[in-house]
Every structure is written in structure tokens, then in C-alpha cells.
Amino acid sequence: MADLKPGGPKVTYATLAAGQTPEFNAAYDDAAERVRKGFGKTHPLLIGGRDVAGRETFKDTSPSDTRVVLGQFTSGTREDARAAIASARRAYETVWRDLPWKERVAFIRKAATAIERRRFDISALLSMEVGKNRLEAMGDVQETADLMNYYCDQVEEHTGYEKPMQRLSEKEDNRDVLRPFGVWIIVSPFNFPMALAGGPSSGALLGGNTVVFKPATDTPMTGWELAQCYREAGLPDGVFNYLTGSGSTVGDELVTNPGVDGVLFTGSREVGFDIYRKFARDYPKPCIAEMGGKNPAIIMSSADLDAASDGVLKSAFGLQGQKCSACSRIYVHASVAKAFADRLIEKTRAISIGDPVLKENWLGPVINRKAWESYARFVEIGRRDGKILAGGEQLTKEPLHHGFFVRPTIIGGLPKDHALMREEMFLPITCLWEIDSLDEGLRLANDTPFGLTAGLFSRDQKEVRTFFDRIEAGVVYVNRRAGATTGAWPGINPFGGWKGSGSSGKASGGPYYVAQFMREQSRTLIVD
């Protein structure tokens, strides 16, 4: 992070903490001031390359201080969604589908460059709109550019996904080609509003598809910034469309309209399954649903407890626990349970809480009032059925009384079959249980409909091999101090879930990602 220019040293979630230099902090502070000057504006939809204003708008406020209005955004209608789909269809058929793959790659690389050029401003916005601390925010933005460039690399390595095949005669020319589906809908979540919007949309675009993008209602401003980066890259009109509005109107139209060829949704298991069931009607169509997790960390008797408590803390409470990869279940061998818990409790109580724009604060607010109230409900359940080991408090005094701030919470003493072992809370709450063996830990870890991430801390190589062989999760880590269950990066840690955590079996940031947005065609040409 010493070099703040695009193309400097590699920045990842695992390396960011070492990069909070005075130079970094000064650049971030300057960006925050610039961003604040743009607050309060009304932002339109982007359909067919045109700004489209609506009759109704909604406010985007900061979860750190709900008095701060970041902007006013258009409440899109079903008619707007239909117009965006039609615009994407025209652009697909007249421009983008037949554009040479090298030209599509060039457009996406330009978008990645635009993101890197704006990365401090977008990061500061993320701190204000989502509640990310400045290092988490920078990670989200930098990851977006890295995802785009990594996916461009995939297309180049596969020469546009056209492969010569064997011949039955000299007169035959046989080729296998991946071709686009058409119009894709990308629905992004609030917690990674850049990476989980820019990554999927760029994958779809590189495959020759056009995109209608709907950001989460809590993060329309970050979605708008992504749209502007695509605009700066010079994408033809209609290739990328931006819609804001409610899931019950705009969202429902997007996933039920017969003019849509593919959907990628990132969010809750409940909503993802609903989309998965109702999207394809007349014939099977691709629906990539990237859903939640209930991610375990297992700490065995030989573990480095200092590293384990660091790794669990970062994964349980980073971004206020609002990650699908957050560590929400901790299984600790009984022989080290007290020593581990003491370390984790001490470190949890030392976490700095407050405005995440400020460099001294590590934990920001939860995203909205609904999440804030859910926190109180889960804490009460934990207090009733177990014991609050740390935290358990909504923060309502100055200077935090206008935001949705809570204390990171550890719950112990719950039955091993308790509902909180299964329910994804998406909050800074984690639960701790004692185990007698790795077998017990693996049985409990796998006893969930989810299968996203998991972690192990052990110095026993036999235990490590057993964990890798038997854990049912798509992303697994051993002895990872930087994050027991979190912190994937494109080209380094592909990120995708098993079981109820994902529908495609392919991981974002992995080598097979772009191909998901394309379908295979076998071509035979007989030459006289």
C-alpha cells in the first residue's frame, strides 16, 4: 500500500492491515471530503445509455448517521424494468454479441482502470453507505478491479473460448465454441456492493451478454458509481443498464420477464431459492444463486490459540458480521476451550466501534434498522438459552445514537442443536461450543444446509488432512490468522459454496467463472 497508484503492490484483504500508512490515510481523508460534497443529488436510472428520471424517489441514508442523506434515487417501475430488458436485447443483437472478444476485453479492462483511478473516492463512499471500515472498503473496491482483470485474463487464455477439435476426415473442420446466452440480470447485495456487482457483470459482459443491473436498495449510490465506471469505459448504449427500486416491483419483473436469458443473484438463501424456482418456465435457463453461509471454525488442542483467536475475531466481526463467509460457529476442543475463549473475549472487548470513516474505528454500524432490531432479538435468545460472554448491547448514546451501532457479541452455553447453530444471523454475533474430538467438530460443522466456508486451527497434519477430506464447504482455510473463514481474493482463493450456499458449483474469482455465462456450440464445416 506504500504505492497508492493503480498497479502498485498487491492489495488483498489479507494484506490490507499492513497498508494503513500515513499516505493511505491522508488520501482517504481527502477522498471523504470530496465525496461529502456530492451528497443530496437525485440520481436517475440508466437505460439504453440515457438517464431516465422517475416520478417517485427514495432516500439513501448512512447507517452511521441516518440524518445524512447520501442521495435521492429513482423508484423504478415494472415498465422501467421492461424498457431496460428491451434495451439490453437491442444492444445484444446489434452490437455486443458479435463484437470480437478482444474488443470486449478492452472495454472491461478500461472499466477496471476507471475503478482503480477512483478507488479512494468509492472506498470512502462505501464507508458512509455500507459502514465498512476504510481497509474493508478499499478491499471491496480493489477486488472489483482485480476480478475484472482476472476474468479478462481467462478470456485471453482461452482465446475467446474457441477450441479446434479432432477430425474424421481432411475435409472436416470441427470447433467447439462457447457463445453468449443473451440478456443477464445481475442482482447484487449490500455487503459487497462493488465486488459482487462488478465481478458478475463483467463476467457476463465478457461472455458476450448484455446486462441489466439492480443494486441492493441499501446501496444504490455505490451501484451508481459502478455504472459511471462502465460509462467512462465507453460501453455502447444498452450494454449495461442500471435500475433502482424495490424487489417486489423491479426485482420481480426482472426475474419473471421472459425476455431475460440468465440471472445471477447474490443474497439470502430464502430469496435465492425463490428466484431459482420461478425463473425458468418454458425451458431451463441459467440461474446462478450465490447464497448464505453458517460458517464454522474448529480449534483443536494443538492450535496456536493467539492466531486462532485473531482469525476467528476477524471473520466473526469484520464488516459487523455481515458477510456470507462470516464465522458464526466456533467449535473448540475442551482441553483449550477456556484459554481460547479468554483470548477471544479480551480481543473482542478491545474492538473500537464508531464512524468507520475514521481510521481509529474498526467496527461500524449494521446496515439498517431491521438488522439492528434483529441483533437485539438474537441477543435475547442467546441470553435466555445460553450465556453472553462478550457484547450483547445496542449502542444508543452519543455520538452513536443516530446510527445502528452494536457491540460484537459472543454467546456460549447453548445446546449443540440450538436454532442459532442453524440460522444465518448476518450480524456481529458468533456462538461457541466445546467439542471432544475432531470427529465431533466435523459432524457439527457439516450439520447445516449451508456449505460456504470453514476453518481449522491445528498443528496435527493428520487432523489437517482429515479436515480437508471431510469438511463440506466450498472455501476452506487452515491456520489462517488473517481470517478463519473469510478473505477470498480473485485468482488466489476462488469463492463459491456447496449445498444451499450456491447453485452453480463454480466459484467467483476462480478459473471457470466466465464460462458460466456462455453455452457450448459444436461447429462442423465440410470443406470441398
Image (cartoon, grey):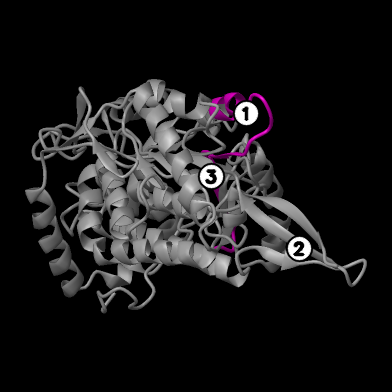
| The image quarter in which residue 428 lies | top left
Instruction: Kindly identify the residue that appears in the image at 18 percent across and 59 percent down.
Output: 359
Find the residue positioned furthest to the right.
168
Q: Residues within 10 Å of mark 3 (few under 14, many from 20)?
A: many
Residue 519, percent across and down? 67, 49
Q: Going from the N terminus, do you reach mark 2 or mark 1 first?
A: 2
**Helix, strand or loop under label 1:** loop
Instruction: Kindly identify the residue that appears in the image at 50 percent across and 28 percent down.
Output: 255
Q: How many marks?
A: 3
Q: Going from the N terminus, do you reach mark 3 or mark 2 first?
A: 2
Badge 2 is on which residue? 175
- 22 over 425 or under it: above or below: below
Instruction: Kindly identify the residue that appears in the image at 68 percent across and 68 percent down.
Output: 461
Q: Amino acid at mark 3?
A: Asn
Residue nearest the observer in this picture, 504 or 176: 176
In 3D space, how far apart are the residues under numbered discs 3 and 2 (Cα atoms)? 43 Å
Query: Taking the image as drawn, is residue 113 in sight?
Result: yes
Residue 347, percent across and down? 33, 54
- Labelled disc at residue 295: 3
Task: Decide if residue 159 is on the left or right side of residue 133.
Answer: right
Residue 451, percent across and down? 61, 43
- Labelled disc at residue 280: 1
Magenta range: 274-303
Residue nearest the observer in this picture, 121 or 419: 121
Q: Amino acid at mark 1?
A: Ala
Q: Nearer the viewer, mark 1 or mark 3?
A: 1
Q: Amino acid at mark 2?
A: Arg
Task: Decide if residue 415 is on the left or right side of residue 250.
Answer: right
**Helix, strand or loop under label 3:** strand
Residue nearest the observer in this picture, 283 or 8: 283
Residue 376, percent across and down? 32, 26
